[in-house]
Amino acid sequence: MEYPAGDGAAARPGQMAVSCPIIIIPAAKSKSFPRKDANGGTAMKILVVDDEKTIVKGIKFNLENEGYQVDVCYDGETAVDMARRGEYAVILLDLMMPKLDGLGACQQIRQFSTVPIIMLTASSEDADKLIGFESGADDYITKPFNILELKARIRALIRRSSMAPAAPAEPDGGKLVRGHIEIDPERRSARQIGRA
């Protein structure tokens, strides 16, 4: 039996063009696997909340391949409870869910936590995005989404949330300190702390 060639070309006489199944090979684990928290402790935890179990499964698989520890739940009430009990680096929160929608869950989480929250939703309306941001969301991504973009947004939020706040200017010299960098505006110089 002959099958058409997969790239649109016809098979040569006497040859059979056979289609092969596509094999998906998981991406190699990142060099920073497993991802540690800012203090070098255990792997960072992410909470994924969506009532669509296939989406949750796909996100969980991809984030675990990146070295994150992933907890999941499927409704807003459980999400609020888990956020209250857990130490999460990021929460991915669907907008439309049973029991308590994503906006209500986000507002309740904001009453006790500043954890970065990314809203996931099928709605791309600007008004919905604005309501999400007003409810306390830090980012917003519409379905369907590219998993690479989602992972990049997660990394960016974790990077920003783990940065040490800038130290206040010292009254004696007005020097500014951020992490391991010291800036002296009067001398117009900068130096790495611990080095001359």
Image: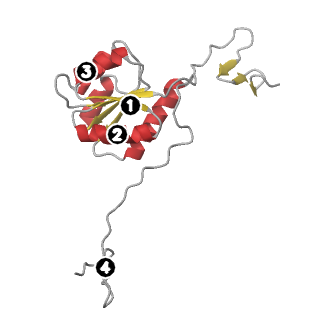
Q: Is residue 181 above or below residue 10?
A: above
Residue bearing the label numbered 4: 17
Number of the label disc, if any, that sits on residue 93? none
Depth-wise, is mark 1 or mark 4 nearer the camera? 4
Residue 139, image x, y percentages: 37, 32
Residue bearing the label numbered 3: 78
Which mark is first along the chain, 4 or 1? 4
Q: Tell whether label 2 touches label 3 (CB within 8 Å).
A: no
Q: Is residue 145 left or right of residue 39?
A: left
Disc 1: CA contacts within 10 A as few (<14), some (14-19) or many (>=20):
some
At label 1, which amino acid type do we have?
Val
Residue bearing the label numbered 2: 59
Gap in angstroms between the C-alphas marked 3 and 4 = 52 Å
Gap in angstroms between the C-alphas marked 2 and 4 = 36 Å
Residue 72, image x, y percentages: 31, 29
Q: Is residue 168 left or right of residue 2?
A: right
Depth-wise, is mark 3 or mark 4 nearer the camera? 4
Gap in angstroms between the C-alphas marked 3 and 2 = 18 Å
Which mark is first along the chain, 1 or 3? 1
At label 4, which amino acid type do we have?
Ala
Residue 189, image x, y percentages: 76, 27
At label 2, which amino acid type do we have?
Ile
Which mark is first along the chain, 2 or 3? 2
Number of the label disc, if any, that sits on residue 70? 1
Q: Tell whether label 4 touches label 1 (CB within 8 Å).
A: no
Gap in angstroms between the C-alphas marked 3 and 1 = 15 Å
Which mark is first along the chain, 4 or 3? 4
